[in-house]
Image (tube, grey):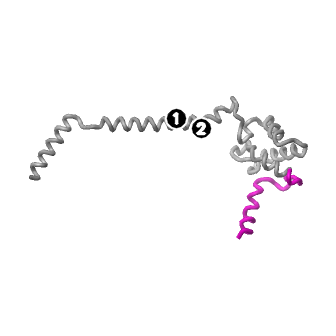
Amino acid sequence: MLTVLILIALPLASHAVEPDEMLADPVLEARAREISKDLRCVVCQNQDIDSSNAGVARDLRLLVRERLVAGDTDQQVLDYIQARYGDFVLLKPPFKPETYALWLTPFVLVLVGAGGVIAVLARSRRNKATAGLSDEEERRVSELLAQSERDVS
């Protein structure tokens, strides 16, 4: 059973990385895979470059491996690619003025949503509090109750 699971998972582990892209040095290949997890495919947009079959993703994978073979550190590789493609290529872009909207929009949306929920609940409570009977309605209910008591007796 374990062997079957391993055989099923083995192709999934390689994702879109082609055999001709892989480095002979397993340490460098592992570093390339880790770096690739932080890089977005600029065509697919919500996939890391290891998961994408797009040509641009392949080019980025090759570029990462080329920079590693040249002796760059992981951060130098990321910096190099970020300089060429911009912050968009990073799956976790830095927190800076150009990306404030990207980072802060989810929090603003949650606050606006919470404010809307609070406003609806407050309006609902206010409507329930003022939904009492008018004087005329109370008089009519009293008459009906008195009449039903007389009919029962």
Numbered circle sitting on residue 112:
1
Image vertical order of residue 88 relative to residue 48, above or below: above
Q: Quadrant of residue 75?
A: top right
Q: Residue at 12% across / 45% down in the picture?
A: 146
Numbered circle sitting on residue 106:
2
Of the image marks 1 and 2, the number of the one nearer the N terminus: 2
Alpha carbon separation for disc pair 1 and 2: 10 Å
Numbered circle sitting on residue 68:
none
The quarter of the rendered structure image containing the N terminus is bottom right
- Residue 141 inside the magenta-drawn segment: no
Furthest toward the top, the residue is: 97
Furthest toward the bottom, the residue is: 1
Residue 94 percent location from the top left of the image: 72, 35
> Does residue 31 appear to the left or right of 143 in the view shown?
right
- Residue 23 inside the magenta-drawn segment: yes
| Amino acid, disc 1 | Val
Q: Residue at 83% across / 39% down in the picture?
A: 76
Query: In front here: 1 or 14?
Result: 1
| Amino acid, disc 2 | Pro
**Label 1: how many residues lie within 10 Å, few (<14), some (14-19) or many (20+)?**
few
Image vertical order of residue 2 relative to residue 78, above or below: below
Residue 104 percent location from the top left of the image: 62, 34
First to last magenta residue range: 1-27
Image vertical order of residue 34 relative to residue 100, above or below: below
Residue 70 percent location from the top left of the image: 90, 43
> Does residue 120 appear to the left or right of 62 in the view shown?
left
Q: In which quarter of the image is residue 138?
A: top left
Q: Residue at 56% across / 36% down in the picture?
A: 109
Q: Are marks 1 and 2 in contact (CB under 8 Å)?
A: no
Q: Residue at 30% across / 37% down in the picture?
A: 131
